[in-house]
Image: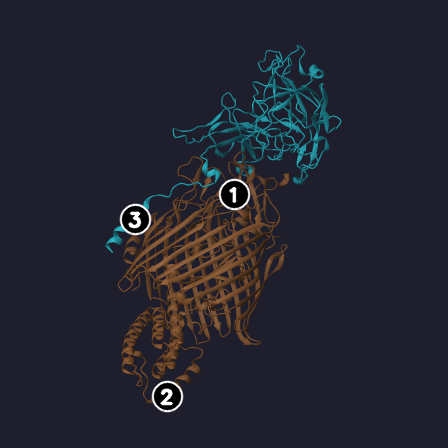
Chain colours: A brown, B cyan
Amino acid sequence: MRRLATPRAWVRAAVLPVALLLPLVARADPRVEAKRHFKNGMALIADGKYDDGISELLEAYSIKPHPNVLFNVAKAYEAAGRPQQAIDYYRRYLDANPPDSGPVKEKVEKLEAQLPKPEVKPEPKPEATPVAPQVDEATMARLAALADRLERAVERAEAREEVLPAPAEVEKPAAATTEPTNFEVPYEETVVAASRRSQSTLEAPNSITVISGEEIRATGLFSLPEILRRVPGAEVMAMGLTNHNVSIRGFNQRISNKVLVLIDGRPEYQDFLGLTLWPAIPIALEEIERVEVIRGPGSALYGSNAMLGVVNIITRAPGAGPRAEVNGLVGNANLAGGNFIGSGGDKLKYRASVGYLQGDKYSRDYASGRPDVAPVITDENLGVRSARASLTAFYAFNKDFSLAASGGVNRLYTELYAIGLLRNFWLDGVTGYAKVDFTGGPVKLKFFWNHATFDAGPQYEPIGQRSLVTSLDTNVFDLEALFQQEFQLAGTHLFAAGVSGRIKRVHWGYIGPALIQEVHFAAFVQDEWRIVKPLSLVASYRLDRHPLLNNGQPGYAHSPRVSLVYRPFEGHAFRGAFATAFRQPTFLESYMDIRTPVPGVNGASVLTEGNRSLRPERLISFEVGYRGEAARYGLSWDVAGYWNIVSDLIVLSAVNPVPAAEAFDPQSGSFLLGRSLFSNDGQTYTARGVEVGGTWNAVSGLDFRLSGALQQIVPNTSMAVCGPCTQAPTFKMNAGFVYRTPVKLDLSSDVSFVTGTTWVEREPSAQDPTQIVNLQNPLGAYTVLNARIAYRFLSDKVTVAVVASQLAPNHQEHPFGNLVSRRIYAQLSVTP
Amino acid sequence: MTRALLFSSLLVLTACEPPPVFPGADKRANTVTGRIEGEVVVASAARGNVVLFLYDAARPPPPEGTGRPITFTVVPQDVLFAHAAPGDLGPHVAPYAFSLVPPGRYLIKGFVDASQDFVPWYGVTADTNTGDVGGAYVDPVTRAAKVVEVGVDANQVPIPALGVTVSFSDAARVPVDRPVFQETTGATSATLRSTAIRLLVDAFPIDAEGVYQPAPIFLARLVDANGDGVPDDSNGDGVPDFWPRVVVRKLAEGQSVLLDENDLDKNGVLDSEGVDYEHVNPMSGATIPADGKPDLCVLAAGFDFTALLPQLVDSMGRPNPAPTPVTRLELVVQPRAIDASDPLRPQVIKGVPAGKYAVTIIQQTGQTWRLPNELTPGLGDAVGLPAIVSQSFVVEVPAVLP
């Protein structure tokens, strides 16, 4: 088995000076504050208070530049009868190459015609703009003060522009995911996951939660699933330091497999096992522009595995952000890490990143030197060690044609709690990917390759027992063509259609000696029909062809979705949706073929087999929601209610006897106690729940966040022990704040509370290990508390922070998982 | 920056503390056990997997007792005889291990499954057959079975038992098939009332897929362990000790006929909770209240070997040292129930508990056969075992019996 060669002491010694020298830039989420200033400004302008309104708009622009603000400033000046200033700002708006540049240019020409000296070219900067001649002295004084204020605001904005991309690029997070920007709604929270195009969260047909990059950085956390705890309805189960299982609206489990995680549209789903290997993600959290979480079915757009939700990670656009950024952390329990991110380029833009992270487990399952059990691993304390690198490049041939390419590699060691009788595993290997996206007008072509090579096995094995160490090699190739077009037919239609093909190749000891290959195809179509101004109808349908879905033969899965979005007032949206989703069987579930030794009975094994006749897990979902905001008060909220019907869950059957003639298994040299087969659960479950979330930008620099989710899962027919029902927490809550003080001190904290559960897991009977029984393991309620304090200096280019995570009492989030305990670490970051 | 440096240094200093050990809910992680390791040494031309059984030393298997194995392990034929030529007597050596063994005293026995029909999960397949080669952990000089001890150290941490050699040789080759039998008429039950019943049981060949016992036989012999020429009478009941032996044990009420009363987990040890009967003082006839402990309820039973006596003794009336193969035995079952939970101090149970009783014949070789078994129609079909009506035989005690 391979190991990273770096000795721990060496790494600590190397990382410490890096951590001390390299700071972390603490950025707050500016969008909410910018929006608040923008809304205030627009309201003042509507009341005829042009100067105050313009001041607010420019304050918004200084926080987060957006070309529409310039447009509205220009309009305000125009309404105030100051054509010269209006012309100035219209010209600055035109610099952003907006889609409506033609009409705006005409407007500029008209305004120029109104000027007393039309031949004089307007100055580009407001400070150089002559005061309009028709004002009196009092107004002149006010305007002078305003000009001074504006000058400072613009300076701030321009200072930000030094490190931020051009305004138009701010709203284009990544070439791969770039969609037409809605220029009518500055500072509107935009998402692309819900409809595979950029749209306001108010327009989104799903329940969706957005976590901005600034919000992520403000937490100081180094593991993305920990940050996902703030998503209403999300269930984050930390089994180890970086071994998390994430589900949404119930049905979490070891090796959680019902939520699709995407990075810039590329799935991180590991098809061989059916999970997201979070520490394998080849990017730094600092590279994330935002994370969009669809709470609910997503198969209509994303196909299989987007059953309970989609986590769409969108990275910063190449060339965007600081040209260089170095971050480091060091903490207790051998926690150390760092990364370097470089970004730049002109025509050809790039973003490059390298990073390293290591840390001890929260706890170990076994003590050293036991007489009965021995470690298979060389470092019993190590929880994760990851060394990764990635490169993303983007080239625009012209406005309509562009090419984006990216690739990454991650040399990874991590722990992973496996299913059934298996417990804590180690994985040691390499993951990698390559991705190419071509955009040509309304057509996009996307290709990616996902690769993973691992050695893996139980971390501890009884001495003398047959080992379960295995190796894995997997490759996934995917090609997708996407077409998007807007047209008019009894309203506006935003139409999208796509086809894709995917080849999966897995060579893995747990599914047999041979390489297994599957070929999948899919097609989807979606139309968003804006019937009348406040009402839109979104209809989607996706067809997936899977090689085994028809009782072992190629079959189809259908995923329709219909959603109605009603926006009676600005900033308020009501939605209702019906959708279905599915999760296809993983390679493990279809082809598994392992003999698990019965603990303490070396002559016996349990044969666990895949099943090629599995039906996909199905979800039928009904959902209603309301999203609203009072931007002037910095308030936004989201309420959702859902009724999910889940059927055909894929579970391991009871251990059934094998025929006497097949009892001895030459492959394992043991007698098969029985066979456990992946099967479709005959039970149907109904999950009902309510989710509420809200944010409040109370004052400048201070944000509060609160969310809660209440759910109940019941079987449709009575059963003695309902695992999915008792394993889902009834209530989850998350609250937090971020305070960016005027004295450069940043404070943030968040707390999550999860009610108790009872986990039904199979174990050998204590009395007779040849009897495999389902045991109910109660798990108490637990609280997760994190806090961060940071200090910024040298013009915010250097930040020193201390982060304390898991400050609440030690706890388990699964009966077999680590004892989650405190991690305290120092962070330093510099943006030269 | 200075403060950050100091803080970071403090973190590094405290970074070396290893993560705590926390086993969670996993039962195995919570239980520290030992192990037994050693080698199997086979001096035989027989070929097959070596199956090793671990027994509690206090509950030896037949013929010494009725104990069942705690666990077992297999040394595959491919490993042990990988380089052995056909007919090569060896010795052939390979390692073995019993993992996760709690502290205690154990016996190790096993056999080379030359007949290659052993399956541990079913009573009808979980025993040796003709041609199998027996073995055990024995004293190399006396060849007597030795006890393996997994002890504990001063900290109560188990100490593994290492270098435990289990020897097999052709001297312990199993000479006969198991004592497969049926009631002579093929009946499926016999009713015991207030008087003893006599049942003729015949050796019953089975030649079916999964169960191949073509030549069962009873090895009849009077016991003369001390070699004084007089048949032994170890329990002092006036009846000479005789092989084969028979156990008629009560079955669990309302459960599968494969489950004995008070041993629902089939581990051969009385359950911690179960059926408890009142006892009777055999001298006074006084009732002894139930003691709250589950009983091992058996019926007084034995073979009437009167008709076989001429074949069991020599001309001097001394027990023949060699067993006499016979195909029929006469079983006598008395209307008397005994609590054999303590084999050294059996207690008389008040009355005869109503219900069904299984009949198990134990051969001198340690081989056994039980009725009813998995060949009972409806029980073994799913796993490919043949269905034979006569193998569902039980002794029934009606409720009216006083």
Is residue A509 visible in the rendered image? The answer is yes
Category of crowding for the residue at label 3, using alpha-carbon neighbours closer than 10 angstroms: few (below 14), some (14–19), many (at least 20) = many
Which amino acid does the dot numbered 2 rest on? Gln
Q: Position of residue A757 (x, y in %)?
A: 49, 46
Category of crowding for the residue at label 1, using alpha-carbon neighbours closer than 10 angstroms: few (below 14), some (14–19), many (at least 20) = some
State whether residue A122 is above or below residue A441: below
* Secondary-structure class at tag 2: helix
Left or right of B184 in this view: A242? left
Q: Position of residue A130 (x, y in %)?
A: 29, 83
Q: Position of residue B214 (x, y in %)?
A: 69, 31
**Mark sitting earlier along the chain (2/1):** 2
Is residue A347 visible in the rendered image? The answer is no
Residue occupying the point 69% across, 17% down = B305
| Total count of labels | 3
The residues bearing labels 2 and 1 have C-alpha atoms spaced at a distance of 82 Å
The residue beneath circle 3 is B12
What chain letter is assigned to the residue under label 2?
A: A
What chain letter is assigned to the residue under label 3?
A: B
The residues bearing labels 3 and 1 have C-alpha atoms spaced at a distance of 37 Å
The residue beneath circle 1 is A421
Which amino acid does the dot numbered 1 rest on? Leu
